Image (cartoon, coloured by chain):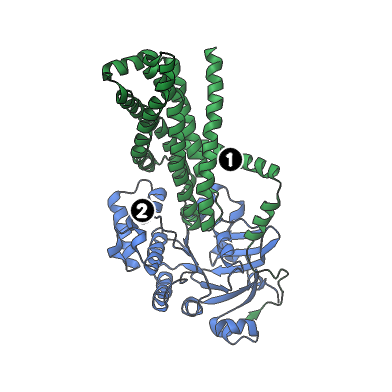
Chain colours: A green, B blue
Amino acid sequence: MEKIILQQPQNETPEAGVPQIFSEAVTQSAFKKFFLEVYSITIFTLRFFKEAFKPPFEINELARQSFLIGYRSLPLIGITGFIIGLVLTIQSRPTLAKFGAESWLPAMVAVSIIREIGPVITALIFAGKVGSGIGAELASMNVTEQIDAMQVSNSNPFKYLVVTRVLSATMMLPILVVFADAIALTGSYAGVNLKGNVSAYLFFSQIFQSLEFKDLFPAFIKTFLFGFAIGLIGSYKGYNSYKGTEGVGKAANSAVVFASLMVFIIDMIAVQITSLFQN
Amino acid sequence: MTSNLSSIKTKPEDAQNGHIILMMEHINKSFGNNTVLRDINLVINKGENIVILGKSGTGKSVLIKCIVGLIEPDDGKMIIFGRNIFELKEKDLIEVRRKIGFLFQSSALYDSMTVSENLQFPLKRQFHSMSKENMNMLVKEALQNVGLAEAIDIMPSELSGGMRKRVGLARTLILKPEIMLYDEPTTGLDPITSKEISKLIQEVQKKYNTSSIIITHDIECARLTANRIIVMKDGVCAAEGTYTDLEKSSDEWIRAFFE
């Protein structure tokens, strides 16, 4: 026999709680929201370190992500690097010429590119391409319940999706920066030869004479931090996105904005630390 | 009568003996100020197909997500195979989840993998030492069971809605679950494909001897698959019975659902 339950619902609103949660979030003070976000990212970061060193390791996915993140970014990074080297050389030449220091052009451009412009510009492009890509991909996986599906099939979605992407970004960005620096110096050589005739040997030997270990090492180290921050922020924004197509756009957008900001913050701290040691 | 109808008949020893494989006791869940589930009590016996009917937003999907621990209720017990899953450690929860299959509303196929890789994904992570030949054999068998053997190397984006549901079902069945959870399995499908999926659910129950919870608002799917139907209204179990019982209900709201 059919059984009818006489208990009447107390709440007549049939919709699930998301709009209420959202409206609550909107009314929260910006201050509280900021600290909640910091807390949430800290927990996410700690979880990354916990999962990253715990077997089993997703080696195949790590290799696949490294290919997608690293190899697929080469053309964009290469073109940008060449243009930066070329433009920087063309723009700097008149100023140096005024002081009769035109011969310092290769050294000045090399130090600028290797110490600062190469890592920062490459990281910003990387944040735009890879950070937004990770954010959008994970957010759309969230929307289409793919992350839930991994969880109920006893896979560890955090390990498979987040750890692999963050590690790939951390490993690939330094390689891309070295590549971008090399291409930018080639661009600079092209720029020098637009109004002159300098041999490649002379140009590059001037560069290598001007560069020291203290120029290369800190610049190289900070690229790992840039890569880690970009991968982590992209993953965090995507993995914790609100469900719905709007959430995908927001995750991609905020991943780029936040990751770019973090690049500058890390750069500022890295420069301060480097100058402390140099002094 | 109250919503405790199902649990009235329940004895704890039944769960121990394995007749009852799933038992919900006083499950409540709120999101902010909005209460989605109110004092839900439900018992599922071995080999039984239960359909949960209800309008959108009545908490049906939240309820089955509570079963696999994707959403944790505010209070209540979820006893599966005699163990309250909310008290289990992660390792034990994995053991319980191993026996539960979940077909998502959107099928939730992994976009970046082929159909074959989608099916291998849970296998690789549950049986680390399984040989590649064995894995391929299981994948082929699972796809044959849902009538999609030819789709093995296709990407999910190339599949139709009905095919996606079948592949999603094959990915779930490959782990030989004892409980199947279907979240709106016929939503977005044409009537013919819906009927095929409903029949497939029946076949799965017979072939694998699974117990199932089917969330739907497709009355034809409910008619074809249900041993017992529970109608949910605003987070409570409003009625319970067989299809025939509920079709002739004295309650106009419930009867309207079956018209």
Question: The disc numbered 1 marks a residue on which chain?
Answer: A
- Callout 2: helix, strand or loop? loop
Name the residue type under label 1: Ile
Tag on residue A264? none
- Crowding at mark 2 (Cα within 10 Å: few <14, some 14-19, many 20+): some
Q: Which residue is mark 2?
A: B113
Using the image as rendered, state which of residue B16 and residue A33 is in the foreground: A33
Q: Position of residue A197 (x, y in %)?
A: 27, 20
- Callout 1: helix, strand or loop? helix
> In the displayed structure, would residue A22 be above or below residue B245?
above
> In the displayed structure, would residue A86 be above or below residue A104?
below
Q: Residue at x 50, y 44 (%)?
A: A235
Using the image as rendered, state which of residue B3 and residue A168 is in the foreground: A168
Q: Position of residue B169 (x, y in %)?
A: 41, 64
Q: Which residue is mark 1?
A: A41
Name the residue type under label 2: Met
